[in-house]
Image (cartoon, rainbow, N blue to C red):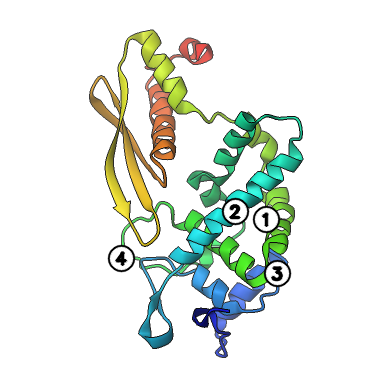
Amino acid sequence: MSPLFRKSTKIDSRDKELKLFLKNILRCKPKNISIYKLAMVHKSYFIKGKKGFKMNNERLEFLGDAVLSAIVADYLFRKYPYQGEGFLTEMRSKIVSRASLNKLAHKIGLTQHIQYSKEGGQFLSMDGDAFEAIVGAIYLDKGYNFAYKVITKRIFSLYLDIDSLEKSEWNFKSKLIDWGQKTKNKVSYQAIEVTENSHRKQYKAQVFINEKPQETAIDFSIKAAEQLASEKTYKKLIEQNIITDEQENRT
């Protein structure tokens, strides 16, 4: 075990609440609560580790992202034995999208345990980041098999409506571009901002229609950010009756 994750001897009310959450929601009795505590520390906040080193959940988020991707791929491979790569890839994208992970974090009550600076503004991906970090913590503390069981049996089976997700629209970028081609409206995209932290970049993408700026979105890949921005733009155009029901049914 890394010296950064030495077992804590000091127990406070926050530790007790976090332990209760892990026990009730994840059915997980932690070997080392310190890892899970760190998973709840947003980058706008920090705790001091050995020799005054400032620590937050970014490294655990990085690890959890990789572990969760493997778990979801494993889960989908078993659940859909006759589906092809394209379907599996799209379903994995839906499950691990920032919007989906944010919702899961809210549903399981993870959000209330996150430590963050309220003066740091709005953190759109904070909940999903913490979800990935807690996956990384479970993996470090209990191993892959236990993490797989917790994520699929405790979270996916109880809090993820996989059937609705399967039927939900995902490729709004394609729908928006198709609409643009059929109605002679030029749809384009631009990465307007890149934020870099200790382990990966976040991209802010914006949709343009006939060179006029539309909706924006942020995610960890340009493609995902464009998809989210496309969804927001497409739904706004429907609300404004720019895209009609007849046009919607054609796309």
Asked if marks 2 and 3 touch (Cβ < 8 Å), the reply is no
Residue 202 x, y percent position in the rendering: 36, 49
Q: Which residue is mark 4?
A: 119
What residue is rendered at 65% in x and 69% in y?
A: 22
Camera-near label (1 vs 2) is 2
Res 28 label: 3
Indicate which disc, 1 or 2, sits on the residue closer to the N terminus: 2
Quadrant position of residue 26:
bottom right
**Nearest to the observer: residue 56 or residue 108:** 56
Q: Please provide percent x and percent y for residue 21.
A: 64, 69
* Residue at 65% over, 44% down: 73
Q: Residues within 10 Å of mark 4 (few under 14, many from 20)?
A: few
In which quadrant will I find the N terminus? bottom right
Q: Earlier in the sequence, mark 3 or mark 1?
A: 3
Task: State the separation of the CA atoms marked 4 and 2.
Answer: 30 Å
Up-down relation of residue 175 to residue 224 (above or below):
above
Q: Earlier in the sequence, mark 4 or mark 3?
A: 3
Near mark 1 (Cα within 10 A), the count class, few <14, some 14-19 or many ≥20, is some
Q: Does 230 sit above or below residue 159?
A: above
Mark-to-mark CA distance, 4 and 3: 33 Å
Tell me, yes or no, whether the two marked residues, 4 and 2, touch with CB atoms within 8 Å: no
Q: Find the distance from the CA under tag 1 to the CA under tag 2.
A: 8 Å
Query: In the displayed structure, does residue 11 sit left or right of residue 150?
Result: left
Amino acid type of the residue that numbered disc 4 sits on in the rendered structure: Glu
Q: Earlier in the sequence, mark 4 or mark 2?
A: 2
Q: Amino acid at mark 1?
A: Ile
Where is mark 2, residue-wise? 68
The amino acid on which the numbered mark 2 sits, given as a three-letter code, is: Leu
Instruction: From the image, tell me which residue sits under label 1.
Output: 151
